[in-house]
Amino acid sequence: MSGPETQAITGRATLTQIDNLSFLLPRMIKVLVLLELVQFGFCLFYYSASGVAPIWSDPGQAIYRTFRSGGWQMLQMPIIAASLMLLFGALPFIRLPAQNKILSYVVDQTGMTISDAAGASLQTPWSAVKRARRTRRHLVMKMQAGGERFAPWRAFSPADAERLWNLVQLKTRNR
């Protein structure tokens, strides 16, 4: 019995820097927003503790002064962090040999196998996938042990991409 539901789904793609950055960007935004909130909190505490604009007696004035006097300095930490995150996210990908960027995917009822042109292979069983989500460019799988894996949709035909998403939903539904 080899119906369309039991046939392996196969795909092939060459990863690009766009794939790498589009995968990293949402994570970077979360970190940058958190850093901005932390820095805003420190500035607010400074103006309140120094008596310039006590937060407890006049919270509106304290927030206004923090924004007004902070100016572009409020963006320093997130800009530096974004630059470092881009650097440390892009450099390893640039240094990766071309053979390791050419990936083949085989997906079946047991899991997903990712192989590169250099011969390395990674088997991801469905039991190791905590949850999955579909973005415009990728299938992103959050792993039980932490970390994430992604597969670009362009690696699969439109029909196979839909079959893959249905299979992933079926296998990760109760997690």
Image (cartoon, rainbow, N blue to C red):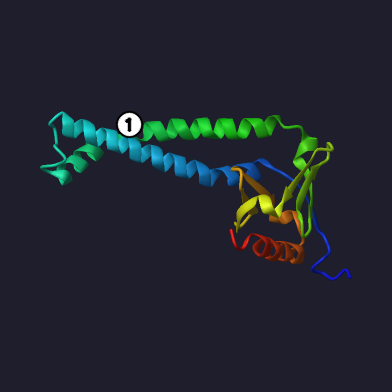
Mark 1: amino acid: Gln
Against 107, residue 66 (above or below) is: above
Element type at mark 1: helix
Residue at image location 78% in from the left, 49% down from the top? 113
Q: Position of residue 168 (x, y in %)?
A: 68, 60
Of residues 55 and 171, the one drawn nearer to the viewer in this rendering: 171
Screen quadrant of the C terminus: bottom right
**Is 138 left, or right, of 27 in this rendering?**
right
Q: Position of residue 126 (x, y in %)?
A: 70, 54
Q: Position of residue 28 (x, y in %)?
A: 50, 41
Badge 1 density bin: few <14, some 14–19, many ≥20, Cα 10 Å: few
Screen quadrant of the N terminus: bottom right
Q: Which residue is mark 1?
A: 73
Residue 49's quadrant in the figure? top left
Q: Position of residue 167 (x, y in %)?
A: 71, 63
Residue at image location 14% in from the left, 37% down from the top? 54
Of residues 5 and 83, the one drawn nearer to the viewer in this rendering: 5
